[in-house]
Each structure stands twice: as structure tokens, then as C-alpha cells.
Amino acid sequence: MSSRAAGIDAEGPGLVKVQAVIREHRLDDVVQRLVMIGVRGLTVRIVGGAGSAEHPRQVFRGVSFPVPFVPHIVLEWVGSESEADAVVRAIQQRAHTGKVGDGQIVVQYIDDAVRIRTGEHGGDAV
């Protein structure tokens, strides 16, 4: 992540948020790899989403119907800009199946972060 998004001061704390939407069954592999490269402070949420893939069908009491939201996992990590490339690479490598619905990774620049307990700001807060 060598360049900053337009309009953000390059003198800032150099923090980024990596957010990835991945398949549920890839979570353990992704987390294992992230821990191996030293990632700490990972947030995980279970979500449902509708992308460009065709809706899967489920059968309930003999009736087949489309399921509009497919379960996925959202991983979020906030850390230094210098570590973001490794985090993105690790997620991409371990979440990849080659099929529609593998998910996506979004990287955002963060202006500041504050640790509630201590009041620390920037990189010290994450």
C-alpha cells in the first residue's frame, strides 16, 4: 500500500483497515495464516450477502425456494500501512477457491484510532 488515497494527508498515522468478505469454510485457513504472519486484533463477523452469483436453492418440507442471502464471514483488521500488503496477500491466498462467491477484500486508509482504555491514538492504539 505505497500510495495514499487522494485527499488524505500523507503525514497521518499510516493506518489502514483491511476488510475481507470470505466463504465460511475458508475461515480457519485464513485465520491460521494470519496468525502465522503475526496478525493481532482481528475482528470476525458472520453475515449474509447477495452478490452477482445465482441464488442457491434450499428445500423445506419438500418445497424448493431460493435463498436470497448466502452466509459469509467478514474479517476486519486495522494496522500499519506497511503490514497491509502481507495481510491482503495472506487472505487472498487462503480464501481463494476459484469459484464465484469467493468474496472480496477492501483496504481503507484510517485517519486515526483511539484505544478507549488508555486514550492512546494512532498506531499505539491498535
Image (spheres, rainbow, N blue to C red):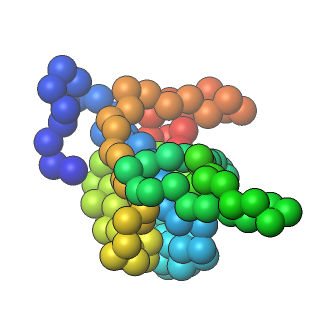
> Looking at this view, is 125 or 26 the one in front?
26
Image x and y of residue 11, in percent:
22, 29
Residue 41 seen in render: no
Image x and y of residue 43, in percent:
61, 51
Residue at the spot x=54%, y=79% of the render? 29
> Looking at this view, is 100 or 34 the one in front?
100
Relative placement, left or right, of 3 versus 94 is left
* Image quarter of residue 7: top left
Residue 103, placed above or below residue 28: above
View extreme (top): residue: 7
Residue at the spot x=60%, y=48% of the render? 69
Residue 17 seen in render: yes
Q: Give the number of marks.
A: 0
> Looking at this view, is 59 or 17 the one in front?
59
Relative placement, left or right, of 42 versus 92 is right
View extreme (right): residue: 61
Residue at the spot x=43%, y=28% of the render? 112
Residue 82, placed above or below residue 87: above
Residue 112, placed above or below residue 38: above
Image x and y of residue 117, in percent:
72, 32
Residue at the spot x=37%, y=65% of the render? 100
* Image quarter of residue 13: top left
Image x and y of residue 84, in percent:
33, 55
